[in-house]
Amino acid sequence: MRIAVAGFQHETNTFGPAMATMADFEHGGGWPGMCRAEAIEPALRGANIPAAGFMAAAAQAGVECVPLLWAAASPSAPVEAMTYEAIVAEILYRLEQVLPVDAVYLDLHGAMVAEHRDDGEGHLLVLVREMVGPDVPVVASLDLHANVSDTMLAQADMLVAYKTYPHVDMGQTGERTFQALMRCLQSARRPKLAWHRLPFLIPAVWQSTEMEPAASLYRHLSSLEEIEGEGSVSFAMGFPAADVPECGAVLWAYAQTQEEADSRLADFLDEVLDKAQGFQGKLYEPDEAVQWALSHPGKGPVIIADAHDNPGGGASSDTCGLLRALLKAKVSDAALGLIVDPESAALVHQAGAGKTIELSLGGKSGVPGDMPLHARFYIESVSDGQFRATGPYYAGCAMNLGPSACLRIEGVRIVLASYKSQMADQSMFRFVGIEPEQMKVLVLKSAVHFRADFGSISDRIIVGAAPGGVSMRTTDLPWERLPAERLLYPGGPSLSQWRIMQSEGQAYSQ
């Protein structure tokens, strides 16, 4: 048995400031850079990546994988048309060279938008299906934030989504996809599908499966699979910063009969709709967030998620709203990361550790309401930015943040880097000499993934709402192509209703 394996991952924020280029996929943005053929397995081995889990499970079962190409880039604005077409063309060329195969596995995100295509994964699946024909199973793993399209569901024999956010089960999802494919091959028939698109968006910061209602919903989802045996149930909560018609949450179920698939879906859909309005919480303005942190000490540091500047959602990771709030409140023993500013990092490396330097730090991405911080900083340490992650999200990945440093201004330490990567691992402080557990306040440019590693050192976590490139308020986004009837959050107004409310000057926002 031979299974062709390829991966092409990108989470697209269509409101983001900069498109993904070929250089971004070659670098990887916190994940391994683009790799091909026999280089893929050693590059991904042991990593918390779906393709790594799939290939490990295949090897254990004595099944041959034929790796083609694997590429991922940090979330951003849409993928450049030329870059998208070049990567797709290479996947197809390499697939054609290894035919015939018994099946195809694709490691996809599910929310990729290209400069010229709303549905990056759907188009790729159409082309793969055309090449291998209707009888060769094509399966894919998807991110929990996938904006699953009708085309994706129609073209794939099975789609299997992550069950955790933070995504600590990416490798396990690859294993589950392999097992689902084996069942598909053994039955020699395509499983029956039932699916439902929810009528609302779910703000990303409230999708965490470590909080309610997602925690209990995904426990129920897992129990359905255990009770029913064969088959698969998935819930992709969507990436709600993509201005495309099929943006939003989708539930789907596979089974041997249509009746079984319909039953599984109905069971889970009822609970999702019943608990949907629980997907909400408080967002703190910068000064409010810092004052809350100072007045609510607990176990370990108080953590403020700088969610609007989360590079994992396509933001620039260079805004200074919460940094200014820390300085205004004269907070001591605070640390913030990452500020991604290659221009400042180059100047810092020229000066060297132990020096004081005047910088215009951050604020270079042009986010409304933000600007660089003009100040003098003490350079505590410098680094080449290369180290190995230790937490469960990056799971041992070799990180490359480029020329980096620890800067100090008054009582605040700042991790300065040259390349974007979400602050989701304690090693991203330690590599420049900051021990996160010793801080009173940590500001993390992340929305949820930080919880996988930092949740163990703190029982005080809030979400900040400083200016950034990815708003956690879906009512803030300048929607143009989202269907007018889509609710902007569970229980909230539809897009058409929201536009009327704005025109009437009503101040109403989730």
Image (tube, rainbow, N blue to C red):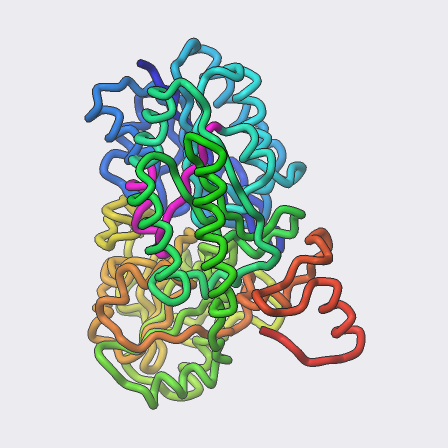
The answer to whether residue 161 is seen in the rendering is: yes
For the C terminus, the image quarter is: bottom right
Count of picture labels: 0
Q: Left or right: 469 with respect to 432?
A: right
Which quadrant of the structure image shows residue 382?
Answer: bottom left
Residue 164 lies in magenta, yes or no? yes
Q: Quadrant of the N terminus?
A: top left
Residue at the farthest front position: 259
Looking at the image, can residue 72 be seen? no
Residue found farthest to the bottom: 295
Q: Residue 469: give x, y in percent of width and height.
A: 56, 62
Stretch of the chain drawn in magenta: 157-174
Residue at 40% x, 22% y: name it: 68
**Residue 65, position as x, y percentages in the image:** 31, 20
The residue sitting at 29% across, 44% down in the picture is 226
Residue 230 falls left or right of residue 434 = right
Q: Indicate yes or no whether the magenta region holds residue 472.
A: no
Position in image of residue 234 (x %, y %): 43, 45
Q: Is residue 98 above or below residue 228?
A: above
